[in-house]
Amino acid sequence: MKLFDPHVINGKLPIDNHIMMPPVLTRLATMEGQVTEALIDRYMMYAGGGVGIIVTESISVKNQNSGRMMRLNEDKFIPGLKALTSRVHGETSAKIGTQLIHFLKISRSGYWQKVEDLSKEEVHEIPNFFAQAAERARIAGFDAVELHFAHAYTMSSFLSRHNHRKDDYGGSMINRLRLAVEVVDATRKAVGEDFVLGARINGDEFTIGGNSLEQSKQIARRLAGLGLDYISVSAGGKFEDAVLKIGEPLNPYSGYSGHRTIPPLWMPEKVNAHLAAAIKKEVNNAGFNPAIVSAGRIPSAFVAENILQNDEADLVAVARPIVCDPNWPKKSREGREIDMLWCIYCNRCREAQAAFEEVSCFQWKKKNGTIEPPAP
């Protein structure tokens, strides 16, 4: 199967296969943003399961608290992350990247800060935040950095048609892309041309008035032209259609757009694959060849292989099935599907994440109350 053949990301980073584990929050960091042994152990399970490359959960580029979320806004966070990458590299053949994020404020009142609320000075700080964090990530031993340009967060919100700023960072597509271009340029300068730099974008926001695939293709083409090594295509996850619950902060994964980010069982397999396929065609036709990553309810090696054989993507991102059984890649390669703990797409892991609780598969819980991941 092509899925298990070696791959080199944009001629720079060799990986064992075409399987990426995309970012999934564990809620195992400290409240101060530091790495813990439990967090390292979790990623070691993923790395030891046969995945080609892991992209860690989001790491904040700024001093922003979000309940057990890692940070890289200061050098003091480097040693903990170095301990993580050293173990992954020392004990497995997996590669490991990290996703960098900048996010805006939300409150239990239902308020969420919008890009229109940021001053010009605050906007101008953002490229440097990403660049400095990326430089620290390279020092910490990561093989790649992914810029989080998707879902409800700052960078995606600048790219969106929901961005109603009146200055040169809002309105037209050129203006909405301006900050992303500045972030990519600053980050590339910080990490160097030889280092793998990717971005995760929305293929479609799935909100009324937001970006559709047509806008996303333009965004991807521009980012590819800046020299990104891969583009991971997600979808949705917006505040604009989030379901308000009194006394709780808005959850961008609670509305329809959020279901497109984390598709439940009632949605078709590979429901978002057409987005990555269209973006791949767009950037390739423009003369650019970053690796395109497809995500969204890819339950089995058969479905993943179908995406690759149809040339809909270069890599497949498998999240919840690997959360469920970290040995999903190894068992799939060895034809041991009978030994697999299969994801049932109940999204209880998503609920735990939203509740700021430790994220794991509820199927790990035994009848006697103990928590035990599936056997290798």
Image (cartoon, helix red, strand yellow):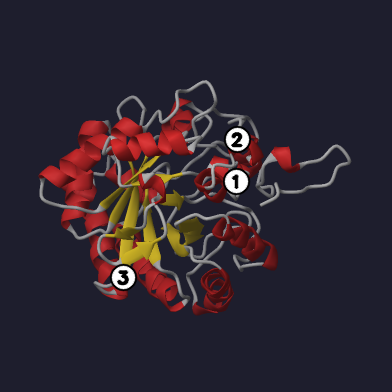
Choose between 336 and 346: the one closer to the eye. 336
Judge whether residue 353 can be spotted in this image: yes
Furthest residue toward right: 368
Which label is found at residue 195?
3
Residue behind mark 1: 323
Residue behind mark 2: 343
The quadrant holding residue 114 is top left
State if disc 2 and disc 3 touch (CB < 8 Å): no
The quadrant holding residue 125 is bottom left
As measured in the structure, the alpha-carbon distance from the residue carrying label 3 to the one carrying label 2 is 34 Å
User: What residue is shown at x 28% (from left), y 44% (from top)?
Assistant: 159
Report the number of discs: 3
Sooner in the amino-acid sequence: mark 3 or mark 2: 3
Amino acid type, callout 3? Phe
Q: Is residue 2 left or right of residue 54?
A: left
Nearest to the eye among marks 3 and 2: give it: 2
Which quarter of the rendered picture does the N terminus lie within? Answer: top left
Q: Is residue 320 left or right of residue 123?
A: right
